[in-house]
Image: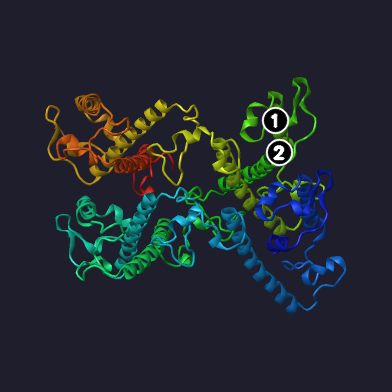
Amino acid sequence: MFATMGYIAPEYFKFPGFLAPSLDLKFADVPSGLKALNVVPAAGWAQIVAFCGFLELVYNKPTGEPGNYGKGNLGLGSIGLGGSVQDPTLRAKKLNAELANGRLAMFAIIGMFFQDGLTGSAWADWALYTASPLRAFEGELGIQAPVGFWDPLGYTADGDVVFFRRRRETELKHGRIAMFACMGYITPEYFKFPGYLSPKMGLQFADIPNGLAALSKVPGQGWFQIVAFLGCYELFINKPVGNEVGNYGKGNLGLGLLGPVKDPESRKKKLSAELANGRLAMMAIIGMFFQDGLTGSAWGDWALYTGSPLRAFEGELGIQAPIGFWDPLGYTADGDVVFFRRRRETELKHGRIAMFACMGYITPEYFKFPGYLSPKMGLQFADIPNGLAALSKVPGQGWFQIVAFLGCYELFINKPVGNEVGNYGKGNLGLGLLGPVKDPESRKKKLSAELANGRLAMMAIIGMFFQDGLTGSAWGDWALYTASPLRAFESETGIQPPVGFWDPLGLAASGNAADFKRRREVELKHGRVSMFATIGYIVPEYFRIPGNLSNYQGIKFAELPNGLAALSKVPSLGWFQIVGFAGLTEVMVYNKEENNEPGNYGAGFLGLRTVGIMNTGIQEPDLRKKKLNTELANGRLAMMAIMGMLFQDGLTGSAWGDWALYTASPLR
């Protein structure tokens, strides 16, 4: 509420005179909103923080009632203009009103920050921002009330209409699939087809469980039929009508029987409604998957899952609303209390360090110690750059002092009090000067608040490190980094939203175009191999080639295990054939790039030109680049997928399956 008033008041009134006489800075010189952050002197920020800290720690004393400090209406009792509100009913009413107003103010200030960051002002007539890139797509399909054009990650900042429409097309397709998926999740709870899904296997529709549990029960041929049907529909039936996103001329519900929707306005309205429903369905199906994976059902009363391992730590420190107990990776599935507390202790310490690190990143931007950091080396504090660049400038003795101080604190000063995680008896801010927090409930509340702030700080410091490593500063306008080596390859194949150019290890920092293209070529090949590898891991679970793999050794295809276990079973001649075929393809077939484009061998869609099914490659440059980008993205996903399969296979003996079945695993 104060922040909202502080945003609005300076638009109409500013104090006369000087904010900082020593800097010759007047109140009138300070801009309003976010721009003021780097104009207000460091001493001013110190005064604000000190005043708030004094109020919080020394002056405001709770009376046992949340938010009641006995200061009366508007807190005026603090300056002697009124006493406390004595009537309990009236006091509760006023505190409730304050809560409601505060909630509204929190939304208001977030909106002001957001608009200020996007447009340079927390308010103003949107019609004035005629040159904004946000204008580029205002009339496009999917820009609907109440949100309007919404692109917080800046996907459309480049104003590229082709990319925008491709994303909108993708969103429509994902939404359509998600709507079918939601219906497919719900319908089998009430109705299943009679008869057999697979007469050959004696498998009835009624035997198939609902939800994620069905994935391992549907036969391989069933999955093949689904994929083949979708592929056929995508490649041969769905033909776009004109340049209109999502319009295939199929009419209402895509039936085609009633003819297309001829009226453009009606068609746009229906497509917009479909987009909105598809967005809702995408959120719904994600929620169903998540709850199904956690509880075994996509819906149901959580109170019924009394035996869930997620129940084990519900009352522990750090289990806070709105998420409650959150452990998607199943660290606590074994119910080990000692391990849980050790992890919570570690999280608290990491959070505390991250909070100091965030302050240590920000403070030197505005203030540095006077004098020398190292008189012997003639190194002043002012000579040390901020952020990651400081790592190589701080002397070795300085790092030794930091490590020694932390080690001394950890080993000799911090002594746990009782069996309470994170409690060392040091009181507020760990100062120890004010004594420990004696009340158990108050102590738990403060430790929980510290945990939450530490989690935020861990995310914040990771973001600062990431941006600092990419741009040379933990904050700033990316448009200012015109000379950054990251600019060199912005238009190359594979530079795709939302990440854009991503090179956290600085491999492209040299700006060497030949090296960059070679790495991109290698990435494409690895992605292609990984896509085949992923398919090759999955297919043998459902289908094997009939007959013998090796007539000489009498080994049938059906006898080979799947996954890593096959490595020792395939005959050496089989490996020789695989290596020989891959080498022949590399050296003799795909041995010449076209147009100096990484990954373009003129092989056309799916490489079919190689086997004579297509006469030419993809001639249109933009379409070719689009397909190579798509292949790169799919290849990146496949590389992650195959690593996950190899990892799980190595740990459990199978790339997938129910963890409960792996009773002999060393992980047990």
Report the disc number at residue 364: 2
The residue that label 1 is drawn on is: 384
| Residue located at (21% from left, 69% from top) | 259
| Residue located at (71% from left, 72% from top) | 95
Q: Is residue 196 above or below residue 511?
A: below
Query: What is the x, y in percent for residue 359?
Result: 69, 43
Tags 2 and 1 in contact by the CB under 8 Å rule?
Answer: yes
Q: Is residue 475 left or right of residue 383?
A: left
Report the disc number at residue 327: none
User: What element does badge 2 sit on?
Assistant: helix
Residue 515 visible in rendering: yes
Judge the density around disc 2: few (<14), some (14-19), many (≥20) Cα neighbours within 10 Å. some
Please state which amino acid type lies under the numbered disc 2.
Pro
Gap in angstroms between the C-alphas marked 2 and 1: 9 Å
Q: Is residue 545 above or below residue 326?
A: above
User: What element does badge 1 sit on?
Assistant: loop
Residue 70 visible in rendering: no
Residues 540 and 356: in front is: 356
